[in-house]
Image (cartoon, grey):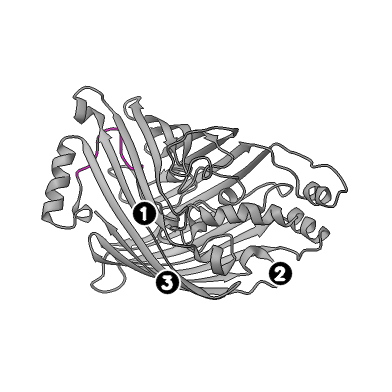
Amino acid sequence: MKYALIAPIFCLLLARSPAAPPDYASAQPEGLAAPGPQSALDEHWSDFQSALTDRGFNLGLTYEGEVFGNWGGARQGVIADGLLGAALDVNLERLTGFWKDAVFHTNILYIYGPGLSARYVGDFSNTSNLSGYNTFRLQELWLQQGFWLKRATLRAGLLAADTEFFGSQASSLFINSTFGAFNLVAVNVANAPIYPVASPGVRLDVAPTSAFDLKAAFFGMNSNPIQDNKHGAYFDINTGPLFVAEAAYLVNQSPNDRGLVGSYKLGGFIQQGDYTTWRSQAEHDLDEGPLSKHGSVYALYGIADQEIYKQADRKIELFVRGGFAPRRYSFVDGYLDAGVNFTGFVPGRESDIAGVGFSRSWVSGDFSAAEQLEGEPAVSSETVIELTYKAQIKPWWNVQPDLQFILTPGGAQGARNAAVLGLRTTLAF
């Protein structure tokens, strides 16, 4: 039954959701904010962006490049990869003079370089959130309309689920992909609409008060989004839809609040598809029985972000995320991550952030039993420990050294643990 493990994980390692995907979907229906110093390389670029914003256009350019190497894992090596992104948001009220509370958004990506996980480490969490299909592609393309006194927005078009769901503000510091769209969705949902893939969909976001936010989305799905849609411009739906919902309780995030900021979320997703139980796959491979199809895969999860200390430019943030999925046909049936970030604790480096993160992905016991039925090693869990430091060199330039330990890569008994060391640089204009 090796194909049952290799196929989905190979696709996963080619395209995983970043822990901190570029914030391409941050435009608000009430209008686009003027670019700040962090958006300008120099005065001329700042003047150019200001002129565009006055006309309703907000253009953002991002480059992220990195070099990473590993010790341990399947074999040793060093890679260099990167991402070039361009995003455009259009304030339609400012552009037209009459279309209120409406925003148009699109972004394009150019991804290059091999993935360290796929080539050397052999893990499924993915050591870098830049890894993806090496191609130039359109990602998101949507129109958003606000209503109900700007308490609600409806968004439709080509959407990526991980720009609005599954996320933690504090975990977005980390480079390993599992701290973004965690393995409950990235591994379990075949061809999920997460970086660098998006899917046709519609999303409703309602905030009845400043303390509550409710959102839900439907995504049309493609069974092979890269082969069928290499550059992101062909919108085909040929498999069951994905539904995602999330409710958030926001602490001290109103304009006049002064306490420590926090957010607490409960969410879940379900995707209709031709998922089969692990045991029936093994028996089918051994000619001992037919495939048993369940039809859908789902998961429930919770997310907590909380500041525990803040004074002047210094703050400490905690995050915890966890969830579970059915073991009969999910590869990862349990997940937990947690971490802590320290901002501004180095004298003279008020914008620098240091963080320590931990994640564990429990592999389904049913999958492990099915593997052993076919004579393969037992599979248990994969653990990631990450230590990172993001240093702001200029308002538009960050440098981030990063150290990761991957324990039992792939979850297989006997797999060699890996240490991963690298450096990322990010330019945002």
Residue found at x 42% / y 72%? 422
- Examine the image and state in which quarter residue 87 appears: top left
Residue found at x 24% / y 44%? 59
Name the one closer to the observer, 196 or 368: 196
How crowded is the residue under tag 2: few (<14 C-alpha within 10 Å), some, or many (20+)?
Answer: few
- Residue matched to label 1: 260
Instruction: Give percent across and percent down for residue 153.
Output: 38, 30
- Residue matched to label 2: 413
Q: Earlier in the sequence, mark 2 or mark 1?
A: 1
- Residue matched to label 3: 422
Q: Amino acid at mark 2?
A: Gln
How crowded is the residue under tag 1: few (<14 C-alpha within 10 Å), some, or many (20+)?
Answer: some
Instruction: Give percent across and percent down for residue 99.
Output: 25, 23
Q: Earlier in the sequence, mark 3 or mark 1?
A: 1
Instruction: Give percent across and percent down for residue 157.
Output: 42, 32
Q: Are marks 2 and 1 in contact (CB under 8 Å)?
A: no
What secondary structure prevails in the magenta region?
loop
Residue found at x 57% / y 36%? 242
**From mark 2 to mark 3, how far is it between C-alphas?**
26 Å
How crowded is the residue under tag 3: few (<14 C-alpha within 10 Å), some, or many (20+)?
Answer: some
Visible residue check, residue 252? no
| Residue 83 placement, left or right of 93 | right
Residue found at x 20% / y 35%? 56
Visible residue check, residue 84? yes
Q: Amino acid at mark 3?
A: Gly
Q: Is residue 88 above or below residue 11?
A: above
- Residue interval drawn in magenta: 25-34
Q: Is residue 31 magenta?
A: yes
